Amino acid sequence: MTDEKHIFNAEVRDVFSGDDLVLMIDLGVDELHKRKRFRLHGVDTPNAVGMGPDTEAGKLRTYVYQLTKRQKLMVTVVSRDRNSWVGVIEVHTDTGVVNLNEDLISKGYAFKGQKVKQ
């Protein structure tokens, strides 16, 4: 994929970890949708696969699922390959827009070496 960013509407289908989700992405053409694994750009949360809800990873997975379920998502894809897409998720709620990437980074879940905005 080139450096061109693509923006799509989407819905969450599953949350593996705080930074690893499965989305149903509206491709914007003739009601075509694509089920795709989606990783949050710049975010690194603990792996929650097989982890209980009382662990840090499990709590983050639940937090992300509760924030995103049945909400309109706007995703900006910054890179993609056959297995997954990487990008930014904005959650549009009744009370406003939450940038999920920025939210998790502000909680300390940035990739090592990435600066956290103050």
Image: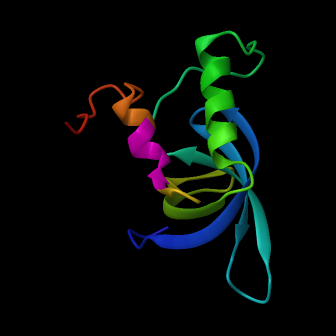
Instruction: Residue 71: say if magenta.
Output: no
* Residue that appears at 41% across and 73% down: 4
* Residue that appears at 73% across and 14% down: 51
Q: Is residue 109 visible?
A: yes
Q: Is residue 73 above or below residue 55?
A: below
Report the residue that reaches farthest toward the bottom. Answer: 30
User: What colouring does the structure picture have?
Assistant: rainbow
Q: Quadrant of residue 71?
A: bottom right
Q: Nearer the viewer, residue 28 or 80?
A: 28
Region of the chain picked out in magenta, as a range: 97-103
Q: Is residue 42 visible?
A: no
Q: Is residue 58 above or below residue 98?
A: above
The image shows residue 101 at horizontal and vertical percentages of: 44, 44
Instruction: Residue 102: say if magenta.
Output: yes
The image shows residue 77 at horizontal and vertical percentages of: 51, 62
- Total marks drawn? 0
The image shows residue 106 at horizontal and vertical percentages of: 35, 33
The image shows residue 67 at horizontal and vertical percentages of: 62, 43
